[in-house]
Each structure stands twice: as structure tokens, then as C-alpha cells.
């Protein structure tokens, strides 16, 4: 199977053994491609993986830590072919990641995302309620990762309306207007998890708003919600009881692998699409862990050809629950993201310590 | 503006009150007065006796360093430089800004300034370790029973990041001591000092160990374990983030000898580290992996070996190390034929060189070759963290003193001569 075939086939349709066979071949080819075209990557491979054993399993695919993209711009295409450099939003005081895209990779990412979303939403664009403030994307010259995510998702809807005003307050008129026009047929909602909870759901309490025809897609990390002690199950339960919304899908993804989105199934677990996969590794030994154990997530994707990001060790903790269980009709690994690796308080003589780069 | 006072007692006080109390001239104690020496010795005893403090090796080490016998030795040492025409007195008020998170530096900094008779203001970070809190508690207990001259000569305060407070305290002090790296020093320096005041700065530093491969190979198993123990203390006590902890291990010897010695050394260190039960949190392992990748791209790294206890990055050629470091047990290593090859590579920010297998003349020759351009401390492996009056190129006891030059009249106009003239 080629990359194009992986994308074209119905998503979540490949049984794991078959999928791994295809991915191992593709990822081995990509590893060679990046070694030939990115000097830094080749150097890393020579030192980190001397004697380069053949890649026969997914776990054999060499990985880079995702944090490396914060200090180094790695490129596997000629500079003239660079189409765009994506930047992560990054929390304050942290360097953002910088990801080099050529047209080909960018197009493949867009296609990949659309294949995943149409699996969920069907081929027709649905009316779309954005759980965001319109000011987020007003200035198209200063687009952060959150705005880029929103713009990407807007492609899957039509007749966009914003549920929040410029001050991030709920705009009840706008929401009621949208529901009056489209609430009787399937419609799409999108927002960042924390915003969706705090600025949307909590403000709808007791307002008797009916979202039962809606499909909510949300993303963006659970960290802030964990601080408020809200679990994914609690988010679902509250939406259902307050608004009768039952179709809620979280997704997991990152700027270092745009397009490779891990979408929640109806069972509440995340599923990799055909062209991507996850591995869980021990947080200290980095050895692959048996399913059921919590460890660091490694993400693999056949999309990146313009930068060596096809196999990345993330800083997120996760667990694989089952493989090919078909619990909600999806093949592949069912997994959850538990959260970020807990930050380590650094000791030391210097109280301004960065890990940014080696000058 | 209210300040949180932590020592001598926990309370809050307005900035003006603290400044007016401390800026007012007081009758100073001379250097090494019995009052202050007794107080420090008692504080040392209190740390030794405390159950909670006994859980932390670095606190025991601090208490040992300020025990009565050591203070007496320091007093004798200080006295050796005495001259009849010099009267040593304290400089007055010292404002200490210790690093955010090496838990004991603030006591060392205070100790040398207090022993020489100075009054002290110490700014503590709001994120404090259990070790710091233990020290502050014991300090309060000891001060509550101390003579008023001692009890009123020290204040420890916490005020977050207020420029206003830093400016007021900076203007009030006679000496400002800034620990905590280049960023901190640069930031604090925007607050001016009084024109007469002076400043000691402790900037970002890096340290290394040098081992003679041939002499290491002659060690028996007990000797290798002992050296692993000493090196472990140097490197791992503060998660390798203390500026005097080694990050680079340089081997001196032929390629074959070094290859053999190094393999044995790292195995012994791994074994010792496991035995000590040292473990870093997962985030540190991730940081080490990211840092390794950065180093492999940017430096001539020929070989990478990762174990949970230690990551070793072997350099093709001795190269200048990066300023940043991951900590948690990550070492660069390189081989040279003779000590003098270190000279062109080491820079101003290199602080401590720990050594094994070299004699005094070899090391003094090396120190002279650095020509004041690099390296402030050359000490045996195992003593990297051992605080000393000589630190970062300063003699701290000296820095905290004001020296009054005092020459009496001699010859025909001397008082004794004049007296005899009046009588005749």
C-alpha cells in the first residue's frame, strides 16, 4: 500500500497486523529519505543508532524527542521549497517548535485531516458553531497555533457562527440565532477543550439550550481542566445532562505532526488513523511497554517528508487499552492520553535554566 | 509595601521599617568576635541535632563546615594576614541574593559575611525546598536565644519579584552579593547601588573533572569504588546543577589506556549510583535525551551511551561545552595527551576543576597556564561542592572586610618624642 492508498482507504479500517506491515515499510523508507536529505538527522542517526539494524517492527523505527524542534529547525527539502514554517503556541517562557513544510507535506496534511473528519462527519459540510471569540482570527497576519487549528477545522463546516464575543463571554443571542436556523438538523461545533468547558458549557447551565443534533469536536489538552478536576467523562456527562449533546469527540494531535490526528471513538478512547500509530515507552528506560501500562507516547506518521518528524517521542503520558477490539467499529490501537510528563523542579546555582539549544 | 520576614521571626513588616532599621549605623562587631563565632557553632549543633535535617546530606555537610573547630581554623587563617598597620572591620550591611534553588548557598554566603562582623539582609525565593525551610526554622530557634547584637544583625525576607524592594535594599547596602546566574545578575544590576557600595557576582559557571588514565588503572577495586563515591557526590548531590558539579570528564593518556580506564570508571559510577538509589524523575530523562540530540548536532560527539544512571557523550575533540546543561547525570567526555591541552579550551565561565592522579607541581603549572582566564578552583575529586572562603576567584572573607590603614607617627614627632620634649 502506498501513502496515497493509506489516505484514500476508509480510515480506521486496517487490522493492526496489516497496518503495521504497511507502516513499517513506509516509515523505513522515510527514515532513509530524511537521512539522505537532512544532514542533522543523518548525524543523529549515526550517533544515536550506530550500526543501524534493519527496521522490521514499528518499535524499531528510530525516534527523535519532540523537544528538539524547539531548538533546531530540521529540514529535508531544499530551502527554496519551504512553503511555510509552523510554530507551536508554546507556554510562556518556552521556545516554540518550528516545523518546516513544503507544499507537498502541507497538502498531505490537509488531505489527511479531511479524511479523518469526513469519516466522522460525512462528505457534506455541516453548519458550524465555533466555540471561540471571532477576535482570535481577526488579524490574519498574527496567527498563533490555536488560531491555525481553528482555521483548519473551519474548512469542515459552513455558515460559521461564534458562540463567544470578543471578551470571551457567551453570546446567547448568537447561539440562539444559530440554533433557530440549524438546530433541527445535524450541525458541527468546535472548540478548545478548556474554552468549551469553562466559557461555553458552564455558562449554558440552566439556560435550557438544546444541542442534541450537534457534534462537538474539541482538542487542546486537559491540563487546565485537570487543575479544575474535570475528567473527560465528566465533560461528556455534563454536556449530556445540560444540553442533551451526546456526540462529543476529543482529538489528540500536535503541531509537530499536523494532520495526524487521533480522534476519540464512541467508547471514549483515541484511535490512530490508517497512516499513523502510537507506541508507549517506559519513561526512564524508553523501552517499549506492554499494552495496559502508562508510559511516554511515541507518535508515528507517514505524512512528514519535508522535516524528519515521522517518528517522535512526545512529552505526553498515555496508555494503550486494546488492539483491534472493534468496540466502536474502529480497527487499531485504542489509547488514552493521561497528561504531560510532570515538570521537574530544577535545582542548581543558576535560577534561570533553559534547555534551549547548545550554542 | 509589606515584606514577608522569615528570620529572626515570621512576620510581615513595611519596607521602610526594614530599611531604616538596617541602614542606620550601629556599633559593629569586629571580625570573628566570640559572639558571632559562638552563635554559628550553636547553629551548627542545632543542625546536627535536628532529626529532619539529618535526612539531607547537604545539611550535614553544611553543619560540619561550620562546626566550632572549623570556625576556629577559619579565625586562625584569617588572623594570619593581620598586620600592625591594618585594622580590619566589617563593611557594614550586606545584601545577599542567593540562587533560587541550591538550598544551602544562602547560609554559606551569610556565614562569611556575619563572621567578619557585617549585618545581613538575605532575600529568599518564594519557592523554597524542604532543606531551606529546615534551615530557616533552626535559624529562628537559635536566634531567639542569641545576644541582641546577633539577633538584630540579620533579616531574611521574601518579596517575590518586586523591583521597588530590590532598589531600596540595593541603595541601603554596602555590599551586594548576587548568586544565581547571568540573567539574575543582569536583571538585579538595573537597581543601582550607593556610589560607595560594591558588588560580588556569581554568574553562570561550568565545571569539569580531569583524570589521569594510567594512574586510575593502577587503582584496585576498593580504590575505584571510593573514587566513584567521591565523583558521585560531586556530580549528583544537586542533580548535577550546582555550578561546581562536573559536566565534562577529561581523560589524560593514550587512546588505549583511556578506553580501558573510562569503561571501568563509568561502570563503577553506574554501579555506585544504583547502590545509592539515585533516580531522576521522568522529565529529567526526557531533558537529557533532548539535550543529547542538541549536542550531537552542535558538537563533535562521536559516541552516545545512555543508561538511566548516566548519559555519556564522547567528544571526538575537546570542545567548549554549551552554557546550558540538562543536569541529572549527563557527561561529556574527551581524551587529551597532556594537561596543557586544556588551556586553550577552557573559558572564563569554567569554575571548578576536580582532579585525580596529578601532583601539586603539575596542577600549579596548569593554574599558571590559565593565566587568570579560566578556572577558579582546582580540587581533588570529591571536593567539588566543598564550600570555601575562596570561591569564584574571590577571597570572600577579605571581600566582606573594610581595611583601615593605620600608620602611627615615628621619629622626632612621634607622641613619645613629643612628650619627652615637653618635659625638658
Image (tube, helix red, strand yellow):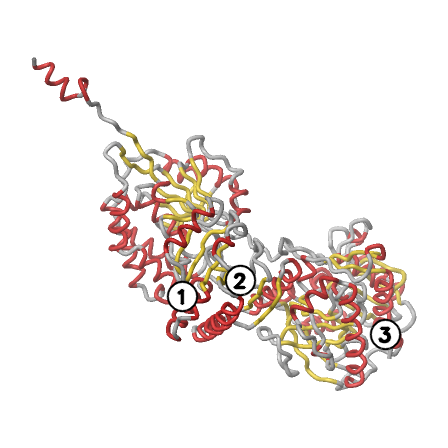
Of circles 1 and 3, the one toward us is 1
- Where does the image place residue A315, in percent across and percent down from the top left? 64, 67
- Where does the image place residue B301, in percent across and percent down from the top left? 62, 63
Mark 1 on the same chain as mark 2: yes
Reading the image, the residue beneath label 2 is: B335
Question: In the rendered structure, are the residues bearing label 3 and label 2 in contact, judged by CB atoms less than 8 Å apart?
Answer: no
Residue B224 lies in quadrant: bottom left
Q: How far apart are marks 1 and 3 (CA)?
A: 55 Å
Q: Considering the image in quadrants, where does the C terminus of chain B appear?
A: top left
Q: Distance between the residues labelled 1 and 2?
A: 21 Å
**Parent chain of label 3:** A
Residue at the spot x=28%, y=44% of the render? B78
Residue B230: image tag = 1
Residue A3: image tag = 3
Residue at the spot x=57%, y=68% of the render? B285
Extreme left residue here? B424
Question: In the rendered structure, are the residues bearing label 1 and label 2 in contact, judged by CB atoms less than 8 Å apart?
Answer: no
Amino acid at each position: 500500500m502506498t501513502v496515497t492508498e493509506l489516505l484514500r482507504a476508509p480510515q480506521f479500517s486496517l487490522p493492526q497486523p496489516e497496518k503495521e506491515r504497511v507502516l513499517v515499510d513506509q516509515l523505513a523508507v522515510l527514515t532513509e529519505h530524511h537521512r539522505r536529505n537532512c544532514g542533522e538527522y543523518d548525524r543523529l542517526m549515526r550517533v544515536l543508532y550506530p550500526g543501524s539494524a534493519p527496521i522490521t517492527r514499528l518499535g524499531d523505527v528510530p525516534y527523535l524527542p519532540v523537544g528538539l524542534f524547539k531548538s533546531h529547525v530540521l529540514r529535508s527539502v531544499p530551502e527554496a521549497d519551504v512553503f511555510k514554517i509552523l510554530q507551536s503556541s508554546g507556554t510562556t517562557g518556552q521556545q516554540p517548535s518550528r516545523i518546516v513544510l513544503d507544499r507537498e507535506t502541507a497538502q498531505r496534511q490537509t488531505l489527511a485531516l479531511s479524511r479523518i473528519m469526513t469519516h466522522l462527519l460525512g462528505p457534506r459540510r455541516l453548519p458550524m458553531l465555533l466555540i471561540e471569540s471571532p477576535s482570535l482570527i481577526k488579524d490574519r497576519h498574527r496567527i498563533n497555533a490555536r488560531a491555525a487549528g481553528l482555521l483548519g477545522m473551519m474548512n469542515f463546516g459552513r455558515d460559521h457562527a461564534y458562540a463567544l464575543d470578543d471578551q470571551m463571554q457567551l453570546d446567547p443571542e448568537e447561539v440562539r440565532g444559530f440554533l433557530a436556523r440549524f438546530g433541527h438538523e445535524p450541525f458541527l461545533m468546535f472548540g478548545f477543550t478548556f474554552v468549551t468547558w469553562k466559557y461555553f458549557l458552564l455558562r449554558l447551565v440552566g439556560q435550557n439550550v438544546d444541542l442534541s443534533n450537534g457534534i462537538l469536536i474539541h482538542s487542546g489538552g486537559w491540563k487546565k481542566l485537570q487543575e479544575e478536576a474535570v475528567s473527560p467523562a465528566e465533560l461528556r456527562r455534563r454536556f449530556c445532562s445540560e444540553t442533551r449533546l451526546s456526540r462529543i469527540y476529543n482529538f489528540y494531535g500536535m503541531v509537530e505532526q499536523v494532520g495526524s490526528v487521533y480522534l476519540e471513538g464512541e467508547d471514549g478512547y483515541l484511535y490512530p488513523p490508517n497512516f499513523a500509530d502510537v507506541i508507549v515507552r517506559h519513561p526512564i528506560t524508553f523501552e517499549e511497554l506492554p499494552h495496559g501500562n502508562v508510559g511516554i507516547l511515541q507518535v508515528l506518521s507517514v505524512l512528514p517528508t519535508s522535516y524528519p518528524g515521522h517518528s517522535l517521542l512526545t512529552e505526553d503520558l498515555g496508555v494503550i487499552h486494546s488492539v483491534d477490539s472493534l468496540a466502536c467499529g474502529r480497527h487499531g490501537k485504542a489509547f488514552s492520553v493521561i497528561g504531560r510528563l510532570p515538570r521537574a523542579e530544577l535545582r542548581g546555582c543558576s535560577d534561570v535554566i533553559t534547555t534551549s539549544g547548545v550554542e | 509595601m509589606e515584606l514577608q520576614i522569615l528570620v529572626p521571626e515570621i512576620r510581615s513588616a513595611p519596607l521602610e521599617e526594614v530599611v531604616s532599621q538596617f541602614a542606620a549605623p550601629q556599633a559593629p562587631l569586629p571580625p570573628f568576635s566570640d559572639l558571632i563565632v559562638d552563635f554559628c557553632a550553636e547553629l551548627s549543633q542545632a543542625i546536627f541535632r535536628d532529626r529532619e535535617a539529618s535526612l539531607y546530606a547537604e545539611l550535614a555537610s553544611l553543619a560540619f563546615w561550620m562546626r566550632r573547630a572549623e570556625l576556629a581554623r577559619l579565625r586562625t587563617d584569617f588572623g594570619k594576614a593581620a598586620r600592625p598597620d591594618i585594622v580590619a572591620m566589617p563593611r557594614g550591611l550586606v545584601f545577599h541574593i542567593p540562587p533560587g534553588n541550591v538550598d544551602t548557598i544562602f547560609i554559606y554566603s551569610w556565614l562569611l559575611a556575619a563572621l567578619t562582623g557585617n549585618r545581613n539582609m538575605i532575600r529568599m525565593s518564594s519557592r523554597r525546598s524542604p532543606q531551606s525551610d529546615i534551615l530557616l526554622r533552626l535559624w529562628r530557634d537559635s536566634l531567639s536565644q542569641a545576644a541582641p547584637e546577633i539577633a538584630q544583625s540579620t533579616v531574611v525576607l521574601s518579596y517575590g519579584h518586586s523591583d521597588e524592594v530590590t532598589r531600596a535594599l540595593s541603595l541601603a547596602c554596602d555590599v551586594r552579593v548576587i548568586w544565581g546566574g547571568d540573567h539574575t545578575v543582569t536583571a538585579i544590576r538595573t537597581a543601582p547601588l550607593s556610589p560607595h557600595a560594591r558588588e560580588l557576582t556569581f554568574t553562570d559557571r561550568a565545571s569539569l573533572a580531569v583524570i589521569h588514565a594510567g594512574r586510575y588503572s593502577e587503582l584496585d577495586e576498593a580504590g575505584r569504588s571510593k573514587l566513584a563515591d567521591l565523583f558521585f557526590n560531586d556530580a549528583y548531590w544537586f542533580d548535577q546543577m550546582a555550578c561546581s558539579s562536573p559536566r565534562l570528564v577529561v581523560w589524560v593518556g593514550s587512546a588505549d589506556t583511556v578506553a580501558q580506564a573510562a569503561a571501568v570508571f563509568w561502570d563503577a559510577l553506574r554501579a555506585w549510583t544504583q547502590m545509592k538509589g539515585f533516580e531522576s524523575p521522568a522529565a529529567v530523562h526526557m531533558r537529557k535525551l533532548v539535550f543529547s540530540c542538541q549536542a550531537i548536532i552542535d558538537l563533535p560527539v562521536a559516541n552516545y551511551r545512555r543508561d538511566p544512571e548516566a548519559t555519556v557523550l564522547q567528544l571526538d575533540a575537546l570542545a567548549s561545552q554549551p552554557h546550558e546543561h540538562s543536569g541529572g547525570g549527563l557527561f561529556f567526555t574527551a581524551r587529551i595527551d597532556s594537561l596543557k591541552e586544556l588551556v586553550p579550551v577552557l573559558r572564563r565561565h569554567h569554575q571548578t576543576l576536580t582532579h585525580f592522579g596529578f601532583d601539586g607541581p603539575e596542577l600549579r603549572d596548569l593554574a599558571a597556564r590559565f593565566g587568570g582566564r579560566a578556572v577558579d578552583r582546582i580540587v581533588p575529586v570529591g571536593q567539588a561542592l566543598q564550600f570555601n572562603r575562596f570561591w569564584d576567584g574571590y577571597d570572600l572573607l577579605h571581600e566582606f572586610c573594610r581595611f583601615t590603614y593605620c600608620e602611627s607617627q615615628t621619629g622626632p614627632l612621634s607622641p613619645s618624642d613629643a612628650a619627652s620634649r615637653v618635659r625638658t
